[in-house]
Image (spheres, rainbow, N blue to C red):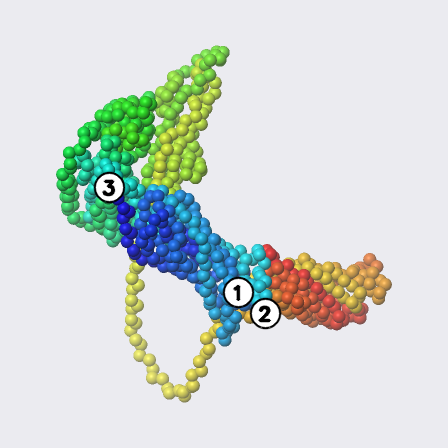
Amino acid sequence: MGRPRLRLRTRRSVAGLAVVGLAAGVTAILAGGTSPAAAAAIDATVPTTCTIPVAGAESYDARISATIPDGAVVGDTVSLQNFKISIVLNVATTDALQILGATTLEGSITAGATLTNASPSNLSIVATVPVTPVPQTQDANGDGPEFTITASGPSPTATLTSAGTAVLTATTVNAVFNPKNAAGASVLPAAKQIIPCKFNAGDNLVLASIPVSGPLPPTPVGDLAPYSVSVQLTGPSAVEAGSPATYVATSRYTSGPYSGQLFGASATFVDDTTGTTLCYTSGPCVVTFPTAGITHHVHADVASHFICCVSSGDPGYVAGPSNIVDTEVVPVGTVLPTPTPAPGPPTPSPAPTPTPLPVRQHVTLTGPTSAPAEATPFTYTATTQLPVGRISFYDGTTLLVTSTAASGTATSFTERLYLSSGTHNLIATTESWNGLDYGGRDNVSNTLTVVIAPVLPTPLPPLPSPSPTPVTDLAPWGVAMQLQGPSTVTVGTKATYAASAYYTTGPLSGQAVGQSLQYIDEATGATLCDTSGPCDVTFPTAFVTHHVHAFLRNTFTCCVSSGNPGHTDATSNTVDTVVVPGPVVTPILSPTPAPTTPTPTPAPTPSPTPSIPFDPTPSPSPAPHLTHIDFTATGTIGLPTVNGTGKVGPGTISTDVNLKGGSFTGTSSIPDITVNASLFGFIPTTIVSSFTQVGLLTGQLAPGATDVTADLKANLGVKSVKALGVLPLTSGNCSTASPVSIHLASNGKGQFSPFTGGTLSSTFAIGKLANCGLLTDLLNAIFPGNANTLTLKLAAKGS
């Protein structure tokens, strides 16, 4: 039997599905297979926000073209085919690169995603950005143009492991951009080349999906021919929003020696409207649609089951998809149409006279159907018509226990089941397993409805009088556990798990109440609850299966003769809960009422006025894009008129850079400066001076941002002067009569960077001092001068 052909179709992701460069790795994962097959085109626009040095947080659009398979089967390997990602870098980024003197840009984009129904499920790719020229032109406003970079790289592969829908979801993204100047040197330090990115808030991060069918049987040789099975789906044509809709998939043999209905086959119920799996069950699928006005197209897939050959007694079967049932969700209170009777089963084709085979086995389940209260375990027996390898006992859809024949096969299986108070629907089902199920098909027994009365507390027996502890009596009582919980839950809604513990050995019987239980998620290794009651938990991520069990820690104290030796560790069965997506809520827009037309008031006839020529006001230019950079400032100051020098800082220089031309403004914060001087060349003097900026600091980055100039004005205060250790002056008001102008500049050798810093120096003049009291004339005789120096070493914070 050849693999079915895959239909071509085009898919488009809406804007907001992913991230810059994400599809360079993760959309690519969906394109390909282990064998040649038709592929479908994907064309997506994916926005994200990345923080670029000197440009800040910027939004980018990336256009991804790639191919994905239109469908696949379990076992296929999927990988990239023919992808290209083009990212448009905006004007602000071009301006920043021009300021830095960059002439080329290269780097990489690393993206991650998850793919359900596949192994591995966590995927990552590094896409290379080749050397790309940076435009050097500018328009009348000083802006450079947008330009495009393109990335590509090798794709990881993933193997599809289960039938259903393989869903690709974006998870992480980061980039490395390395701009270089004409000499080939990087204009960014390595630490600044790492570009953090994040998904835009509110975007749907599901990128694509692939329908995955069950594995196909090998091409038949001789009598290696599985039977054929058809699937008929029934369900409502209309249902009220919020009310349950029930779908039933019926499988019937259409070829082979069997006829009639195939029991026990599990079906996947799929909503083609949303692409989600509604149920995976061997019984009816009950689902609630919350939103009116949507028609859901539902079908069922029964996985093929191929074993060996007709001569084995059970070659298995091949099943196709069912018909599609269209269910319209109508508002609450709508009169629903009368259901149309479901079509009868198809007429089976005449089957050839088969080789005599064993009669298909049937399963009979027997045991008690009621009890006045929870007590010791209830015993149930499943009897098969032919030998089988194992049988599973279920309470509804919850697996209680699987019993395996000790000798390989058996016709009778007995299990002790622990049932809590309430109503239980027990069934037993055989499983084809390693060729030991000689009857062929999975079979389901009759249903036993068991009603258990509410729990009746069992009083503890009185403790015996103390007696010596016997050496051979150190035996705790046995405890068994039963866990119940949902098989599916909608993402973001509460899932409730309830565990019950029962004594199995020792003088006590019935339920062990009041015990503290741990509920553990095997899928994540996390403890969900630690409580003596039910465990309520909310799972935030769809398409994840959580394997939950409960654990009761032992309380062994001594021995049976003590009256209460405690009990052993106990672990419950595991409940598998599949998290399914929530409904898509369509917003209802309230119409805006039309404004009421006011009754016009007669206006007086205006007097003629002279015509004034129209003088249009020019539109204001958009505010420049500013990038904030902070520097730590240290250095020295020299006052040659007093033969003095002093250390400056550490202080802070804060700047806001305009990317269009490299201009910037800023502020300085410099602590008091202590100057050690020699007055008149021989009198040791200590001067404490303050530095207070006046107005804004202004400056300009040179082309390439490797040199810088800055201008500022400051009042220099004289807070104290000590000559020979004597304090002749202490004043908070003594300062320069007018602000000092300081012009700072780097050395002009290209040794400055806005991302690391550099050294700036200045020679400046100090004028007359004022408000220095009796010493004003003396200080003005020694302080003013034109050859004062200031050297600042700037270090960019975070570099």
- Name the one closer to the observer, 787 or 358: 358
State which tag comes first along the sequence, 3 or 1.
Answer: 1
Please give the name of the residue rendered at 23% of the width and 32% of the height, measured from the top-left corner. Answer: 311
**Residue 706 shown left or right of residue 171 in the figure:** right
- Name the one closer to the observer, 57 or 423: 57
CA distance for labels 2 and 1: 15 Å
Instruction: Please tell me how crowded label 2 is: few (under 14), some (14-19), or many (20+) other residues with Cα within 10 Å.
Output: some
Please give the name of the residue rendered at 46% of the width and 16% of the height, measured from the top-left corner. Answer: 474
Q: Which residue is mark 1?
A: 104
Label 1: which secondary element = strand
Q: Please identify the quadrant where the C terminus is shown.
A: bottom right
Q: Which residue is mark 3?
A: 319
Please provide percent x and percent y for residue 78: 37, 49
CA distance for labels 3 and 1: 58 Å
Q: Amino acid at mark 2?
A: Pro
Closer to the eye: label 2 or 1? 1
Instruction: Please tell me how crowded label 1 is: few (under 14), some (14-19), or many (20+) other residues with Cα within 10 Å.
Output: some
Q: How many marks?
A: 3
Q: Amino acid at mark 3?
A: Ala
Please provide percent x and percent y for residue 261: 19, 36
Q: Which residue is mark 2?
A: 703
State which tag comes first along the sequence, 2 or 1.
Answer: 1
Label 3: which secondary element = strand
Please provide percent x and percent y for residue 146: 46, 67
